[in-house]
Image (cartoon, rainbow, N blue to C red):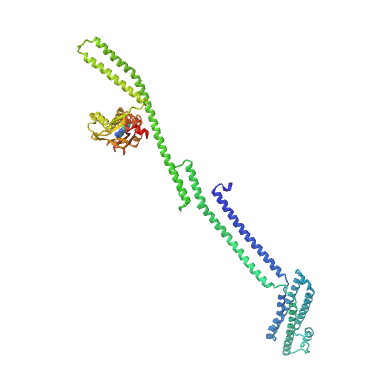
Amino acid sequence: MFFLRSIRRRLVTGFTIALTLMLVMAAAGIVGLVWHQDAVAELEELLLRQPDRDRLMAVVAGIPDTLNLNAQLNLKNPDALQKLRHDYHAGIVAAEDEFQEFRRKLESIDQTPEMFRQQGLIYSRLLLVERDLVQLRQLQQALQPGPDPADVAPNAGSPNAGSPGARPSNAVAADTVAETFGAVIIEASRLNSEIRRTLSTLPAFHDSSQVLSSLGRERRRSERLLKLILILTPIAVALYGITILFGFRWISQPLRTIARGASRIGHGDIGYRIPSVSRWNDEFANLTENVNRMADRFQQSEESLQAKVEERSRQLIRSERLAGIGFLAAGVAHEINNPLSAITMAAESLQNRLYDVVDPGHPDEKEMFDRLSMIQRESRRCGEITARILNFSRGENAEKAMDDLTRIVGEVLAIIRPMDRYRDRTITFERVEPLMVEINGSQIKQVVLNLVANALQATQPGGHVEIRLLEQIDWVIVEVQDDGSGMSTDTIRNLFEPFYTTKETGQGTGLGLSITHRIVEDHDGTIDPISAGAGQGSLFRVRLPKRQSQQNAA
Ligand code: ADP
């Protein structure tokens, strides 16, 4: 599936789902709050549409109170009187408006069966209230400047209102006004009480004030909640963004680096190492370390494999060259065999003829027979040599027998020590006790001869060569050490190649060590050249198994 194909995609998908959920929840919260507010507003409106009996009573009750307070203090002050009149008028108008509103609401609300039954009673009471309101309005006339008590008395029904009087002087007028006001107040209070009593017999319909205030609180609460959600949502989204950012930095990026590095190593760049992806010692650091360690191992094994392949290739080339030389030598040996046989046979027949033709006692008789014998002996020796060459080139294992290595080294030294050119070098060989090993004596003699000759050739006059024989449980070790020219790494690498020589033309053939190597291998041994470098001397160490059968069995 596309969204799950990589860890990165899975993370993105997970984060997207979580973000969507968060946004959906925030949206649901906002929508819920808006609906809640709508419901509160609807309820509020419904309550406001109900007729409010108590409110009407309160408004009506306000009319005489205002009149009373002001009247006590300011009856003689025309301005105050004016204000009083104005307040009374305003009170009446407010009461009338409230009454009209009350009636309108009453007519518009849905009637309960109870209300329907009481309908006649309710409306008759309303008529009474309306009548009393009209009377209150008429009382207002009595408060006009220069009120005519005659106008007031019949309407108010006050006992004082109908007292006769001529046009008063200022003082008299003030008294009259006070009197009139007193009468109005009494009448207004009575009417007021009347209205409230009538109203109190009506049903209350409801007590909306508490519900309204509770709804107001509810509305404010939900407004605060809405603000909170609007503030918290962007903060939550920002926090979420930060989490995603760090999620990518802490998880996705290290994983990508490791995956890329592993792929690079996997594609053959085994020298590449994944850089550190985490500053903590966590799973990523662990994984990186293990992948790098694995790459180290790959590299090491590849290098050692490479070295082995190189060594094997060199051995192969060496064997091929030696085989070539062997083939050539075998051809030559084979070709030489015939003339050698002819020479031997000719020498023999000549010797036989000479017995017939040469007189006994001839002065040259002895010399002639000696020379002919020598020709036969040496040509037979040549035949043996060619036979050995043929054996060697055929790769036939030379016969091995228990032989004394100490004696063989002694024989080599017996050949070399008398040589004039090595007289000024010192050769040390201290071992005297025999060391019996299963070897081909003449081949191992050739090995020792080659190594000692090379060592002497590498030293300057006054140089020193030491030969050591060491015995182990199953092995013997022959060491030839000199303090001569030493060997570079390049020389050490090519030592056993046929025809490899650093000596001047005519001085060396470059075959000595390759043949030595071949002989040691035939004996299932090893040969190690060791040198610290040019001018540091050399050491050749040959290891041979004491018994061939043991070695083969192992
Ligand atoms: P050759 O002696 O004919 O050159 P070898 O196969 O015997 O052929 O030796 C090959 C080369 O190995 C020599 O040319 C020389 O450079 C180096 N060599 C062998 N033995 C020694 C030694 N003891 N000290 C320094 N170099 C040596």
**Up/down of 354 relative to 86, above or below:** above
Quarter of the view holding residue 367: top left
Quarter that holds the C terminus = top left
**Going 68% across and 83% down the picture, which residue do you hit?**
69
Residue 234, can we see it? yes
Image spot of residue 540 (x, y percent) = 31, 35
Q: Vertically, is 91 above or below 18?
A: below
Give the image location of residue 16, x and y in percent. 58, 53
- Residue 312 in the image: x percent, y percent? 40, 33
Q: Is residue 272 left or right of residue 27?
A: left
Q: Is residue 90 left or right of residue 419?
A: right
Residue drawn at (57%, 51%) of the image: 13
How many numbered marks appear?
A: 0
From this view, report whether residue 48 is shown above or below residue 60: above
- Nearer to me, 329 or 348: 348
Residue 326 figure quarter: top left
Q: Nearer the viewer, residue 441 or 236?
A: 441
- Kindly indicate the quadrant of the structure image that contains residue 23: bottom right
Q: Position of residue 71 (x, y in %)?
A: 70, 84
Judged from the image, the quadrant occupied by ligand 1 is top left
